[in-house]
Amino acid sequence: MANELRLFRSLWGVATHGAPSLRAAFTRSAAAVPNEVLDQLRAKGYSGIEASLADLGGCTAARRDTVAALAARDLKLVAGVYSSWVDYEGSWEDLHLPAAAQLASVVTEVTELARVLEGNEHVLAHVNVHSGGDGWGLDETVQFFRDAESLESLLPSAPAAQRGGHAAESPSLSYETHRARPLGNLFTAAQVCEIVPNLRLTLDFSHWVVAAERLVGYHSAMERQLLGFLAQRVDHIHARVGSPQSPQIAGPREAESDDTQCREVHHALWQQCWQAQIDRGRRWVSATPEYGPPPYTPLNSSGEPVYSVWEATERAAEALRQLHADTVLPSSAGRRLQDDCIE
């Protein structure tokens, strides 16, 4: 059975550090995502966008306009919803709210998402949840994810008419392994997944690496075993290569040996996640190449980014396409890489 790779382009930083024509389009647009942005992403082969409610527009009407524009172009949406610290902007005090309050916030965002998608429910491919706070203990974390199991039932489902009368995979929901969240630590994530067997993950391995201040799994059999266990839980990947000292590496340092090592380990884990999904019979796998603007991108002495965020993301997208091809029809080099880095 053929397996498809669906790449989604995050809107993070596109308005400020995207291609010049797209930055101009955002300047002209007062509300919804500009059509020029969606047209260019479609032309580049993306399956859709990954965006928070705020990214989609400043109000429900503007967000509905963006969703309609996606539908018109046969593009899909990975929706980002938040329990606290929305889009990682402004105050983070609400990270410390208790689990019940943060779950209520997610329900509010999912309810708004359903309103936005009304009539175009088929546009929704996946929901990525940024949830909880890193100050929670294990008991509160486990209780949150147990109580959150009902969230998937709130996701809008496309009626048969939107699907041409054919069956389609329902949109799924997973929780990101982001710093400042309970799952931002590899070991906590493994503990929680052991206790909550239905918990699904959006893997951003770069956060685990920089939070641990080491290339997790590279020298430790125990860490490799945990990564293998967690790879079985991954439904979506945020594909950004990080290092023990930075959540993001790209651009002119690519030839340095430490960066090459980081890149190889990230790539091998992403392939392991995809292979687990293929083994479960998944018809398609997904990833969002996600390179961020400053401060994720370092600045030079003139205060300018040392490399183009847009170009770094495009290079990452091409690398992901090759990785997926090597996962489905693994080359001997790809097999050796996975054996060396992960197994």
Image (cartoon, grey):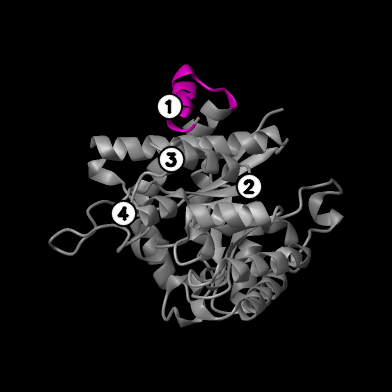
Query: Which numbered dot is residue 233?
Result: 2
SS at mark 2? Answer: loop
Against 259, is 86 above or below? Answer: below
Which of disc 2 and disc 4 is earlier in sequence?
2
Query: Which numbered dot is residue 340?
Result: 1
Looking at the image, which is closer to me, 51 or 236? 236
Rendered residue at 78%/60% (across/down): 157
What separation in Å lies between label 4 and label 1 (alpha carbons)? 23 Å
Q: Which residues are magenta?
A: 328-342
Residue 336 in picture, x, y percent from top left = 45, 22
Against 58, is 36 above or below? Answer: above
Q: Amino acid at mark 1?
A: Asp
SS at mark 4? Answer: loop
Q: Residue furthest left?
A: 301
What separation in Å lies between label 2 and label 1 (alpha carbons)? 22 Å
Query: Which numbered dot is residue 232?
Result: none
Residue 152 in picture, x, y percent from top left = 74, 62
> In the visual, does 178 lie left or right of 112?
left
Residue 47 in picture, x, y percent from top left = 58, 47
> In the visual, does 334 lie left or right of 235?
left
Quickly name the residue at label 3: 217
| Image quadrant in which the N terminus is located | top right
- The quadrant in which residue 68 appears is bottom right
Which of disc 3 and disc 1 is earlier in sequence?
3
What separation in Å lies between label 4 and label 3 (alpha carbons)? 17 Å
Judge whether residue 306 is colored magenta. no
Which of disc 1 and disc 4 is earlier in sequence?
4
Judge whether residue 338 is colored magenta. yes
> In the visual, does 60 lie left or right of 90?
right
> In the visual, does 214 lie left or right of 135?
left
SS at mark 3? Answer: loop
Residue 37 seen by the camera: yes
